[in-house]
Amino acid sequence: MKKALITGGAGFIGSNLADKLVEDGYDVTIVDDLSMGLISNIPDSKDIHFYEKSITDYTFMEKILIENNFDYIYLLAAIASVADTIERPYSSHLVNQEANIRILEVIRKNNLKPKRVIFSSSAAVYGNEPTLPKKETSSISPESPYAIDKFATERFVINYGKLYGINTAATRFFNVYGPKQNPHSPYSGVISIISKSLKSKETFTIFGDGEQTRDFVYIDDVVNALIILSNNDDAIHNVYNVATGHSVTLNEMINVFEKISGNHLNLKKDKERVGDIKFSKADVTALIGLGYSSNFDINDGLKKYWESL
Ligand code: UD1
């Protein structure tokens, strides 16, 4: 039985990945301190082993890594909100960077040989540099503590791989949405916040004119991308944008969501969010080269998401 570790496995992306791995017959260990994740996200299965622990508990992490000798390690635990890392740059750094390097150190020092270690970086590394679409080779401009830690850790992960012979890879997620994204967090993605407003008839606040664009990618595409990166050796020591390759404005997305839900969204406008990126869109040619295709455009993705609610 293949053994996988998912840090942040009670979170949005991690728990959806856990569902898929369990379905595919993996033995899955989840480490999550439930600071953002929810215990109810974790699939109910005898093949899941859940530890309510922070990845900054180094003694625990070392023990679990050595004892289990995992085949696949998914580093998804993070302080996932840019705004949150601006509030607490140092404590978030300890999670977003330091704890991940400690994991790499355990792998290196103990000569562990996982088939893959995949780190989740972010489109935030591109910052506000305006050239679109973003390729993995586009210039980067990490501006927040979040983006700086994601970029630096991504480089550590890739180069630990090259220097010490570890099969590492990294993703740069764009705007991921879908089931299990916690809509009650103020740091949640805009689509989950809108879904909550559509259901409860609460007023949704749109920051700016709604003409900002995003490459919204449905969670099933993201899980599929993670599986591809796990199984295709060409992915080793490389970083990949994970997105659809298409973008829509917030206003367009809201229109589609209103039609699908049959509900009207009560809107109020507020000023643009500080540090907000105006336009975002990915080039996913590299990932397509590994066999990926995005199966959910915004219409299909929102439909599936709404049905799941
Ligand atoms: C997202 C990610 C972030 C990642 C970045 C990469 C989430 C929660 N954040 O940030 O981790 O680093 O992409 O580019 O997925 N908006 C509103 N009203 C709201 C909430 C948001 O109008 O109540 C607007 C925002 O101002 C923004 C857009 O919706 O223009 C998307 O916001 P959000 O979902 O928070 O994602 P990003 O800021 O793009």
Image (cartoon, rainbow, N blue to C red):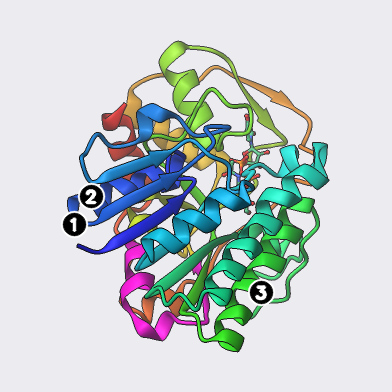
Circles 2 and 1: CB atoms closer than 8 Å: yes
Residue 215 rendering spot, x and y as whole percentages: 52, 55
**Residue 308 at x, y percent in the picture:** 28, 31
Graded by Cα atoms within 10 Å as few (under 14), some (14 to 19) or many (20 or more), the crowding at tag 2 reads some
Task: Give the residue type at disc 2.
Answer: Val
Disc 3 residue type? Arg
Q: CA distance from mark 1 to mark 3?
A: 30 Å
Residue labelled with disc 2: 22
Q: Which residue is mark 3?
A: 155
Q: Which residue is mark 1?
A: 24
**Is residue 102 placed above or below 288 in the rendered structure?**
above
- Residue 127 seen in this snapshot: yes
Distance (Cα) linking label 3 and label 2: 30 Å
- Tell me what residue is drawn at x 23 percent, y 50 percent: 22
Residue at 82% x, 46% y is: 90
Under mark 1, the amino acid is Asp
Which residue is at 18% across, 57% downward?
A: 24
Decide whether residue 200 is among the magenta residues: no
Which of the two residues, 239 or 112, is positioned nearer the viewer here?
112
Residue 43 has which mark?
A: none
Q: Is mark 2 within 8 Å of ligand 1?
A: no
Q: Which residues are magenta?
A: 224-241
Q: Earlier in the sequence, mark 3 or mark 2?
A: 2
Residues at marks 1 and 3 touching, judged by CB atoms closer than 8 Å: no
Between residue 140 and residue 21, name the one nearer to us. 21
Locate ligand 1 by image quadrant.
top right
- Residue 137: name its quadrant: bottom right
